[in-house]
Amino acid sequence: MSEWTRTCDPSGEGGSPAAPAEPNPGVADFADKCRTASCRSCGQAGLEPVLDLGMMPLSDGFVPAERLAEPDERFALDVAFCPACGLMQILETVPPEKLFCEDYPYYSSFSDTLLAHSRENALELIEGRGLGRDSFVVEVASNDGYLLRNFVERGIEVLGIDPAEGPARAARSRGVPTTCAFFGKELARSLREERGPADVLLANNVLAHVADTNGFVQGIRTLLADDGVAVIEVPYVRDLIDHGEFDTIYHEHLCYFSVTALDHLFRRNGLFLNDVRRLSIHGGSLRLYVERVERVGERVREMLAAERRDGLDQPAYYRGFARRVETFRGQMRALLADLKERGARLAAYGAAAKGTIMLNYIGVDADTIEFVVDRNVHKQGKYVPGVRIPIAPTEALLERRPDYTLILAWNFKDEIMRQQAAYADAGGRFIVPIPQPEIVAGA
Ligand code: JHZ
């Protein structure tokens, strides 16, 4: 049992003084919605309810000043579990063109931790698979070229594919050839005809984002060379549930994968999950090694057995989550209200997509959190969707000296606290919300 689970929910089944006494009026509707829904992956009719976060704005829909008068578009954000294939998923599908548009504000290169993580992955593949000038490496959701640049540097032929023109432009400007498109079966077929099969196909933090999950996997199979490998990273649902990372649930993330659900998904589409590693990135992820030939390694077998043993393939594992999330909300509200009452000034660090969900779910606006800072110049000057808190450059922390800074990008807390040592030295304190609300003096 995780630290978070222990603190918030000793029974593991929810129920705490902070949980609201009134039943959520939406609960009956939510249960009905789950009953009539079918699984995105295996098509099973009838899902099990997990969590209803209510109507939420789009997490990366940062609002420019000139659009402040317009209301935010909101969509239901509710999560269910498929008892047949073990996939946790959201029920709503927002059109991808709305989510990954020209001005998609997420640029991977603003985190040094992620850059180092990606470089290590690339160098290991180059070495391990003996990649060279005659190799072809494709990355789906290549963003601003943060990963492929490491292959380009070694003279390896690469192609990035990303539907968001802004990040794709940034990638091209650093020498990473990038096609601006959504990846799927059709694109895979035409690329294979034009360019030949891929020796390595990378797809990090994108499998959970696509509406046609099976079609996307079929596309991977089509483009992959017979002896090629697809190296795929996804957040791990075990970490999400065990550490209470509810804020990583948003409309861009349609699926929340276990190894069990992934194994079913790949097999259904003629691919095999042959190796897997657990990673700490993004609050806990899996790196998957997927091939056209079946040679399932020990690590996959062990993780499948561990998931069966711990019940990740059963609804009961997910059942207490909703009440634990409500308890968390009560704790955060109480903590922030107490600090405000004592006259403290509050800010936040990291206009992360998950930060939008955290702030909207807790229900705090600019009266409580004066401003959010972020290194990403594409977010600065805009406002957090829903709660409309302004986003400033990171220097604002030292200039405006809030007493406490809530780290919304808690997955990068070590990097952030190291970088903000001067703020901490000047007396500033951090609030790390996940896995449990905690006040920290600094790195
Ligand atoms: P970060 C993204 O989610 C988007 P987000 C996406 N939906 C996804 O799948 C997940 O990642 C995995 C800033 N920052 O990366 C940069 C600093 O300002 O946790 C970002 O705006 N200074 C594709 O958006 C934000 O914080 C720093 O020193 O939740 C972090 O966002 C660092 C380290 C980050 O992911």
Image (cartoon, grey):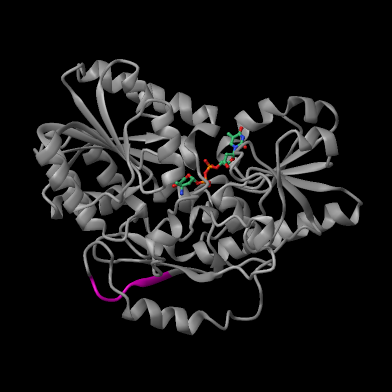
Of the pair 246 and 137, the residue shown nearer to us: 137
Q: Is residue 146 visible?
A: no
Task: Answer with left or right where residue 226 lies relative to residue 43.
Answer: left
x and y, in percent, of residue 244 in the image: 54, 53
Magenta segment:
44-49
Q: Residue furthest right?
A: 343
**Vertical order, 203 against 50 (above or below):** above
- Is residue 47 a member of the stretch shown in magenta? yes
Coordinates of residue 170 in the picture (x, y in percent): 45, 34
Q: Is residue 252 magenta?
A: no
Q: How many numbered marks does the figure carry?
A: 0
Query: Residue 126, relative to residue 143: is it above or below?
Result: above
Which residue: 58% across, 58% down? 357
Query: With 282 as the anchor, is 375 left or right in this view?
Result: right
Q: In the picture shown, does residue 397 fall above or below 318? A: above
Q: Position of residue 75 (x, y in %)?
A: 50, 70
Q: Is residue 432 above or below residue 15?
A: above
Task: Pinpoint residue 200: horizontal percent, then vertical percent.
Answer: 21, 31
Q: Main secondary structure of the magenta part?
A: loop
Q: Report the quarter where the C terminus lies.
A: top right
Please indicate, yes or no, whether residue 440 appears anywhere in the rendered image.
Answer: yes
Q: Is residue 119 left or right of residue 398?
A: left
Q: Nearer the viewer, residue 258 or 210?
A: 210
Q: Taking 98 as reference, is 413 left or right? A: right
Where residue 314 sits, quadrant-wise, is bottom left
Residue at the spot 24% in from the left edge and 65% down from the top edge: 84
Foreground: 228 or 78? 228
Which image quarter has ligand 1? top right
Q: Residue at x 42, y 26 (%)?
A: 174
Q: Quadrant of residue 395?
A: top right
